[in-house]
């Protein structure tokens, strides 16, 4: 019988080390407190004849000792845990990006190569993987115990987490946030594979078009290209080279054209209008799903290094 899930990611041993350090420190503190307590209970019991006069003790030294030493230990644990936390919250720049949509009651996974999965997530061992998470309906929580990662998936916004699997295997995915009647059935599996096997899986399961290509088709079908691309009339910002760049807004602020900003531009275009443009763009709230939003963003990302005529993005 296993008391702990398998440790199968780079962050898992560090998370476990902090957990066991907290357990050990708590055990020491309990021993220091309850050990003398039990000793005094026996020594100074009613029937035992002992000296009960109040001894002279260095109270100031004692107060300082039991205040300063625990504080140093706790602050050391805080600094250690903070270092691991920030490492866990900052995905490496070279991380592979995969999108995950939580729905009642399933996980839909989409790879940049176009491969889509339901309640399964295939990843290569030894490669950092960044998950961008969105919810189609209610709050979910994406939890992989073997990787020691858990992240709430909140409607109306993107959250993210990353991991690097260290050994091949199949590991459980759970929703750890109660999300309705069939919450307990919202489970899945991470399939960690050797890099060569993962590449074969991508090829064998390839749908024939990438996520960015699907986004490009959707971009045209929704009529976005009429204003944002190839028009001689300036009605909307061009999207070539915009991703990741600062965007001056009509209200004088500056936003960065990241996933969250572009999502708001699609669903709530009047909220943060780019400077020099009228708020004419219609809202696509309710007209596109979370899956389609990911595809549109993948297409815009694919234009990040494209130059328009004249050499300016």
Image (spheres, rainbow, N blue to C red):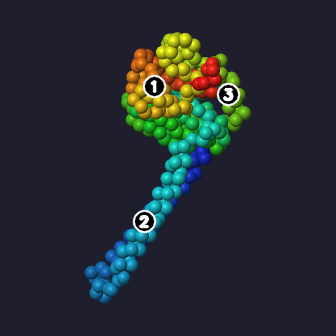
Separation of marks 3 and 1 at Cα, in angstroms: 42 Å
Is residue 52 positioned above or below 143 on the image?
Answer: below
Q: Which residue is drawn at 42% across and 19% down?
A: 278
Q: Can residue 126 be seen by looking at this rendering?
A: yes
As helix, strand or loop, the secondary structure at mark 1 comes to loop
Q: Can residue 220 be seen by looking at this rendering?
A: no
Q: Residue 71 carries which label?
A: 2
Is residue 48 positioned above or below 169 on the image?
Answer: below
Q: Residue at x 32, y 86 (%)?
A: 55
Marks 3 & 1, CB-CB < 8 Å contact: no
Given residues 215 and 187, the one toward you in this image is 215
> Hey, which quadrant is residue 154 in on the image?
top left
Q: Which residue is drawn at 41% across and 37% down?
A: 177
Given residues 277 and 111, the one toward you in this image is 277
Q: Earlier in the sequence, mark 2 or mark 1?
A: 2
As helix, strand or loop, the secondary structure at mark 2 comes to helix
Is residue 95 positioned above or below 73 on the image?
Answer: above
**Mark 2 residue crowding within 10 angstroms, few (<14) / some (14–19) / many (20+):** few
Q: In front of the other: label 2 or label 1?
A: 1
Q: Residue 311 carries which label?
A: none
Q: In front of the other: label 3 or label 1?
A: 1
Q: Position of residue 114 (x, y in %)?
A: 61, 23
Q: Where is residue 106 in the image (x, y as percent from the top left)?
A: 48, 27
> Hey, which quadrant is residue 58 in on the image?
bottom left
Q: Mark 3 points at which residue?
A: 201
Q: Where is residue 220 in the image (x, y as percent from the top left)?
A: 54, 12
Q: Position of residue 26 (x, y in %)?
A: 44, 62
Separation of marks 3 and 2 at Cα, in angstroms: 52 Å
- Quadrant of the snapshot with the C terminus: top right
Q: Which residue is drawn at 63% across and 18% down?
A: 309
In the displayed image of the protein, which residue is found farthest to the right? 196
Q: Earlier in the sequence, mark 3 or mark 1?
A: 3
């Amino acid at each position: 019988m296993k008391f702990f899930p398998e440790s199968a990611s780079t962050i898992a041993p560090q998370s476990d080390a902090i957990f066991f350090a907290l357990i050990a420190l708590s055990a020491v503190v309990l021993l220091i407190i309850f050990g003398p307590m039990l000793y005094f209970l026996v020594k100074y019991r009613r029937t035992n004849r002992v000296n009960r006069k109040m001894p002279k003790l260095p109270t100031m030294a004692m107060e300082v000792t039991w205040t300063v030493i625990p504080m140093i230990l706790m602050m050391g644990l805080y600094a250690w845990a903070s270092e691991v936390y920030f490492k866990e919250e900052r995905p490496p720049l070279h991380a592979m990006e995969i999108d995950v949509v939580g729905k009642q009651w399933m996980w839909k996974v989409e790879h940049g190569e176009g491969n889509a999965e339901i309640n399964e997530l295939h990843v290569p061992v030894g490669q950092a993987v960044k998950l961008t998470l969105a919810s189609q309906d209610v709050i979910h929580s994406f939890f992989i115990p073997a990787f020691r990662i858990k992240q709430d998936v909140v409607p109306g916004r993107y959250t993210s987490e990353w991991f690097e699997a260290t050994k091949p295997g199949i590991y459980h995915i759970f929703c750890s946030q109660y999300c309705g009647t069939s919450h307990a059935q919202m489970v899945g599996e991470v399939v960690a594979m050797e890099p060569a096997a993962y590449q074969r899986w991508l090829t064998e399961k390839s749908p024939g078009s990438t996520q960015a290509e699907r986004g490009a088709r959707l971009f045209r079908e929704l009529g976005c290209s009429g204003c944002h691309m190839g028009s001689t009339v300036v009605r909307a910002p061009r999207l070539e080279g915009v991703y990741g760049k600062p965007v001056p807004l009509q209200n004088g602020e500056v936003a960065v054209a990241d996933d969250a900003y572009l999502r708001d531009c699609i669903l709530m275009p009047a909220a943060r209008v780019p400077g020099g443009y009228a708020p004419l763009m219609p809202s696509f709230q309710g007209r596109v799903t979370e899956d389609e939003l990911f595809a549109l963003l993948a297409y815009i990302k694919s234009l990040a290094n494209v130059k328009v005529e004249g050499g300016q993005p």
